[in-house]
Image (cartoon, grey):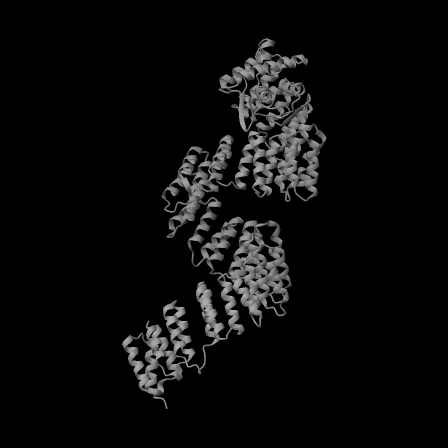
Amino acid sequence: MLQQPIVSFIFSTLDTKLLTLKQLQQIHGQILANGNLVFPPLINTFLHSCHRSRNPNYASHFLYNLPPSFSKPSFWDSMMKASLQSNNLLNFFTCYNAMMCCRDPNANSPSAGMFASFFQYGAKFGDPQFGKLFHGVVVKLGFDSDVVLQTGLLDFYAKIGNLSCAQKVFDEMSQRDVVACNVMISVLGKHGFVEDARVLFDSMLDKDSYTWNSMVSCYLKVGDISSARLIFDRNPVKNEISWNVLIDGYGKLGYFSNPDNLGDVVALYNQMLCSDLSPNQSVLSLIIQCCASFCVIQLGKALHCQIFKWNFKHDVVLQTGLLDFYAKVDDLSSAKRVFDEMPYRDVVANNAMISALSKHGFVKDAQNLFNSMQEKNSVTFNSMITCYSKIGDIHSAWLIFDSSPFKDVVSWNAMIDGYCKAGDLNHAEELFNQIGYVKNSVTWNTMITGFVQCKEFQRALQLFEHMQAERVKPTEVTMVSLLSACAHLGTLEMGEWIHNYIKKNKLKIDVVLGNALIDMYCKCGSISHALDVFHKLKVKNIYCWNSIIVGLAMHGYGKEAMGYFCKMTQEGVNPDGVTFIGLLCACSHSGLISEGKMYFSQMQTVYGVEPGIEHYGCMVDLLGRSGQLKEALELITSMPLKPNAVVWGSLLRSCHIHKDTKLGEQVTQRLLELDPSDGGNYVFLSNLYASLNRWKDVDRCRKLMTESGVHKVPGCSSIEVDNVIHEFVAGDGSHPQFSQINAYLVEIGKKLKDEGYEADTGSVFHDIDDEEKEGSVSYHSERIAVAFGLMSTPFGKVIRVVKNLRTCNDCHTVMKLISKVYKREIVMRDRNRFHHFSNGVCSCKDYW
């Protein structure tokens, strides 16, 4: 009969108090003095009290001094587990050694389950030596045939990444249950041996949900989405984890970032709901991000409802995702409501709200939230810098930047971008130089893009050279900006070098980079290369189609542009306003009058595109070039929009072409009322008077220009030779090789006269003799550039010139003759279009 009062007192004392060593010794003494008190529950309670009171050594002493009949492995097991849980390896080995020394050989031996817990510890803490030590012990004790223990050992080697030992344990197992096979599939997949994992998977007679999920995970780890989906679709025991593994894997592989996969994402989500299964927080977050990226409003709102249904309404991550979703689909009121209803807002949620307010122009509200935040990080400050930069308040952006204690590379990049967008390249470059070693590729891209946006194209190319010298790896963004610079400058050689760099370094040519390449080749005069890039693009968006149609129009390929328009509509791509600008220009440059009228009439009726001021300008140009000046004027006076300087300017150019002085004077008057500071209007009218020898009227125009403080924009032409851009201004002799160029121009003049050339001096609006006029036109900038090209490039190389103004009639004639006499192809881009001169003929067929 147990002494109940003593037992109750000891239990109560051990369970409720942290005991000193002396108190533990006293209780130990009572237990030893009353042999009836030595029974398993009391022993376990005493051992736990020792550990709770931080006296594990006394627990070992207690066990070691128990009578052999009571020294059971289970008691030691409890002690050793407690030691491992507290990561006290010294006490663990003390207990283990004591157990092995005092155990009765005839009594029960340590259990397999005990050693299984040892392997779990080794796997959890990644301690290979610990696990390997007890691997030898279990073999010695004869546990190597125990399936549970062998599976634990297999799991240990799998988790520490030792595939060879895991494979050896698996191969030596006498029996392999589904758990062991699952572990082996996982470890094979982790190390990339997916085919071996698949062989094992196919050989298994019994599979559970973990088996199927592990095989799906294996394929996702190596990026094989199609095989992962195939296994997933075959899985007869799908559970919530199955869906979560697949969708989470899709997210990590960027599957959700491709708009083409959006339908599949929606279908997956709906199938999951039909299976009465709920996605986890991670999967919901991924789908919300997908909805935000592609503005899938209906699905995003449905997810919002489901989040409430599944009781995730207090999850700050999902609530922040919803906030970001509503901000990106331009539903700021819903974003504010989500934010206001959040029971807890962390710094990430506050940052998301600042970005949302910034995007919609609520700068004051963003600043108020910023000021109220107790916790801020670098993202908070960077969001406010971007917020002020967007509205052009660069001073406030600088104050935020200057006060930030968390300046990182993103902060510097945001500030540099702000200065670039404000057109303040000096301060942007100053910060760029100050940032030092912190610069990353985004920093370089931001500065290069800034130069391009501010039309400092040569500086952009020079900075790229510096970027290469610093061995910073360019990205696709770098290439897009550089190609834009090349397009504006007309530097084909540099553009081709960049294209080769893209191919050599295997940069991804997506629609953005592909469109930049098409645009560059079109504007640099190589329409064949532009078409080659266009046809190789796997995916083409509206911008790619527009670039090729506009490019063909610039080069005078009107019918070809119309052909690509037909292909575009056949492929289901809807045209926009830019498409029709390209089409109408194509018709105008190629003299396709009826076709141009047809497209203009179909814009709204067939394609739902409302004509803008640019389209009316194109139509006026089309009618005016063909000599239908009266109809062009009627279109202007009847158009629903107020005609601007571009529209009237198109008619004025037509008046000059067809020498209609009366109408030209009327149009000029309208233009001067709209923009009295544009010297081009005076020049067109003066040229018109000069061509009719009305010198008094020419003088009157020049006097008006002087009185109004208006100056004629000088003609400027550039040519690229050996990746160096050379610029020439009409009559300017500042080029270091001008004496040689001048001599070459004289030689060209002589050869052209031998061919019967007579100068057309109609563009010279000075009342001077014919010889002086002839000398004046012979020094137009494009002639100087072509002469330099002839003397600086090898025979057979195409000469490419870019001019800022429309080329005059005389220079157009000269280019045709030079191409014939010197047997050189000349490609010239003027203000309106391209001219391809070859063997005495121009691609424009003298219609420009």
Vertical relation: 142 (above or below) 361: below
Residue 656 on image: x %, y % = 63, 20
Vertical relation: 733 (above or below) 436: above
Residue placed most toward the observer, 263 or 223 = 223
Quadrant of the drawing holding the C terminus:
top right
Identify the residue shown where x is 54% and y is 26%.
674
Q: Residue furthest bottom?
A: 1
Residue placed most toward the observer, 349 or 734 = 734
Residue 455 on image: x %, y % = 51, 31
Q: Residue furthest right?
A: 594
Residue placed most toward the observer, 628 or 537 = 537
Q: Residue furthest left?
A: 22
Where, by quadrant of the figure, is residue 609 drawn?
top right
Residue 492 on image: x %, y % = 59, 31
Q: How many marks?
A: 0
Q: Is residue 88 visible?
A: no
Q: Is residue 772 visible?
A: yes
Where, by quadrant of the figure, is residue 103 drawn?
bottom left
Where, by quadrant of the figure, is residue 683 drawn?
top right
Quadrant of the drawing holding the N terminus:
bottom left
Q: Residue furthest top?
A: 769
Vertical relation: 113 (above or below) 732: below
Residue 450 on image: x %, y % = 48, 36
Q: Is residue 636 left or right of residue 10?
A: right
Identify the residue shown where x is 57% and y is 27%.
645
